Image (spheres, rainbow, N blue to C red):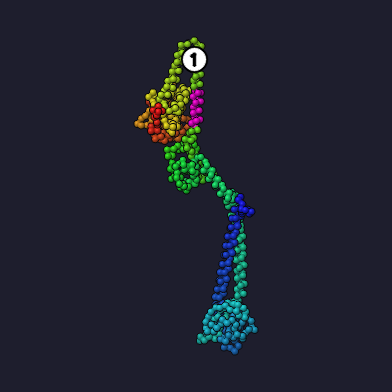
């Protein structure tokens, strides 16, 4: 955790807790203040309306009006006024004449004395109103209503009031209720703040903001440092992450985060991975005339697919390493095949010599040497690309171990190739020859033959491989170049070679197709642009 000078910084959990509590306290205090203020105003208004209603009803009381004509009106008016006061819960009901002499009062000793307050003058002129003044009982809200005879002549005034101290009691009672509600709200806020802070802390795995920022920065640095291109999408197919190497390999400019992946990478299969949750590993993908090695893996959280991530790598870099290993393997395979063949021929020569058939031994040696020399001469003269020639020689030795003859058309011609396309030509030739060898191994024929030819047709380099095996029958002819389609019973990891042939042929501006074989076997033709070739080294000089 980061620290300030001399004082540790509060953790996220405590900060969330304090912020939520502060918000709750401020909200409750402000709300209580305004609610209490509203209730106080409401109580005052409702009290004013109440005392005015009581005053008006009292002023219309016929017994009180009639009592004004008696010699001692207080004897009649005092009991009536006290009854009204008790029923209405008013603090007082005071009736006085036009000289402000009281005929009723809650304290009988004040009967016959003048009304106190100074706000009664308007009532003596026949006006009805509410005021607030200090009387003998204290500060009160009081209503004034004139008392009139049936003829309309004003004979007195009734004043009904409620003391402010009585209103304060009501306000304090409401305040207690509000304070209790505020306390309950603060307790709930405290509990909610505690639960929220714990939940947020748990959701972010107990990390502090500074630690999260550090992790994100480290993640960005790590992702940027990875040599492979990385593209991740969510379940809606929108890009959530793309690193700089992915932009470079896929030739993407600008910020692509948030865009649909199908707009940025039209031939992507990421949405298939999101849909079925199955990973695609080590697939070759063509993008802008570049071959990329692609892995697509679903992102799974709590047994649910939440997206997918794809990694890309330029296959030329992978091939640089693979070709070094492949060359060594081809060399070893060729040596092994030649070793077996050489031992077999030595056994034949040894047997002929032991049988004292010296002329036959000499004839056998001359024939073996001439056949081998003929193969070397064809490869040296017809196949000027050394990588392809080495591949063909290795496949010849492999085919001989299975009693298969691999023949090169005498009219074939393969010029020296540009280094950029050598790997693709090697892939095409190697897979076509390997398929032919494996097809003939399972064929029940006495003479097993593979014919290979190179020639230029209509400005394109044509590579033709034919065998006299069992051929490709039925619906497989339409699907043979699709990935995973094979003629072999044990499928295993088969069905990849011909799909690679097609991909590389198209990468070089051509294609691959099945031709009609004359001997019932399979004949496959691949054509590529000859503009990718260069003149032989002798002509360059």
Q: Whole-percent x and y of residue 339?
A: 51, 21
Q: In the displayed image of the protein, which residue is found farthest to the bottom?
A: 71
Residue 202 seen from this side: no
The part of the chain drawn in magenta is: 322-337
Circle 1: is it few (<14), some (14-19), or many (20+) Cα within 10 Å?
Answer: many
Q: Quadrant of the C terminus?
A: top left
x then y, percent, for residue 371 = 43, 19
Residue 333 in magenta stretch:
yes
Circle 1 sits in a helix, a strand or a loop, which is it? Answer: helix
Residue 76 image position (x, y, % from top left): 60, 85
Question: Depth check: 251 or 476 in front?
Answer: 251
**Image position, residue 302 (x, y; %):** 55, 45
In depth, the one of 315 and 452 nearer the eye is 315
Confirm whether residue 456 shows in the render: yes
Tell which of 378 and 77 is nearer to you.
378
Q: Residue at x 46, y 33 (%)?
A: 496
């Amino acid at each position: 955790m980061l620290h300030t000078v001399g004082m540790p910084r509060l953790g996220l959990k405590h900060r969330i807790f304090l912020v939520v509590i502060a918000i709750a306290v401020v909200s409750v205090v402000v709300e209580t203040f305004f609610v209490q203020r509203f209730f106080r105003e409401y109580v005052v208004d409702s009290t004013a309306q109440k005392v005015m209603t009581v005053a008006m009803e009292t002023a219309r009381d016929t017994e009180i009006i009639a009592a004004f004509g008696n010699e001692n009106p207080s004897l009649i008016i005092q009991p009536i006024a006290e009854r009204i006061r008790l029923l209405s819960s008013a603090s007082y009901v005071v009736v006085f004449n036009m000289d402000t002499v009281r005929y009723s009062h809650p304290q009988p000793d004040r009967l016959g004395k003048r009304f106190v307050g100074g706000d009664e003058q308007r009532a003596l002129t026949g006006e009805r109103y509410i005021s607030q003044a200090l009387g003998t009982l204290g500060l009160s809200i009081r209503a004034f209503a004139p008392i009139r005879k049936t003829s309309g002549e004003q004979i007195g005034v009734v004043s009904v009031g409620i003391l402010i101290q009585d209103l304060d009691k009501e306000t304090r009672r409401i305040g207690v209720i509000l304070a209790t509600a505020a306390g309950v709200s603060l307790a709930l806020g405290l509990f909610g703040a505690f639960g929220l802070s714990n939940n947020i802390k748990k959701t972010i795995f107990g990390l502090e903001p500074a630690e999260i920022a550090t992790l994100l920065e480290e993640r960005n640095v790590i992702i940027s440092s990875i040599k492979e291109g990385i593209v991740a999408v969510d379940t809606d197919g929108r890009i959530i992450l793309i690193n700089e190497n992915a932009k470079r390999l896929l030739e993407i400019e600008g910020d692509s985060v948030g865009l649909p992946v199908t707009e940025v990478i039209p031939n992507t299969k990421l949405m298939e991975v999101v849909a079925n949750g199955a990973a695609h590993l080590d697939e070759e993908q063509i993008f802008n005339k570049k071959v990329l090695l692609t892995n697509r893996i679903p992102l799974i959280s709590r047994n649910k697919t939440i997206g997918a991530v794809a990694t890309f790598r330029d296959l030329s870099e992978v091939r640089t390493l693979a070709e070094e290993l492949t060359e060594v393997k081809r060399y070893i395979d060729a040596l092994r095949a030649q070793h077996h063949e050489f031992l077999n021929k030595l056994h034949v020569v040894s047997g002929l010599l032991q049988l004292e058939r010296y002329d036959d031994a000499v004839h056998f040696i001359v024939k073996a040497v001439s056949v081998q020399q003929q193969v070397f001469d064809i490869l040296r003269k017809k196949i000027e690309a050394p990588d392809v020639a080495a591949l063909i020689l290795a496949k010849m030795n492999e085919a001989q171990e299975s009693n298969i003859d691999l023949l090169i058309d005498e009219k074939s011609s393969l010029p020296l190739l540009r280094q950029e396309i050598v790997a693709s030509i090697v892939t095409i030739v190697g897979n076509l020859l390997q398929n032919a060898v494996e097809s003939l191994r399972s064929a029940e024929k006495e003479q097993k033959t593979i014919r290979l030819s190179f020639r230029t047709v209509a400005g394109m380099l044509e590579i033709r491989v034919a065998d006299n095996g069992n051929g490709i029958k039925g619906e497989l002819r339409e699907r043979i170049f699709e990935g995973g389609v094979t003629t072999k019973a044990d499928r295993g990891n088969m069905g990849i070679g011909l799909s690679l042939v097609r991909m590389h042929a198209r990468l070089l501006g051509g294609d691959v197709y099945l031709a009609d074989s004359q001997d019932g076997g399979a004949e496959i033709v691949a054509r590529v642009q000859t503009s990718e070739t260069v003149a032989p080294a002798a002509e360059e000089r």
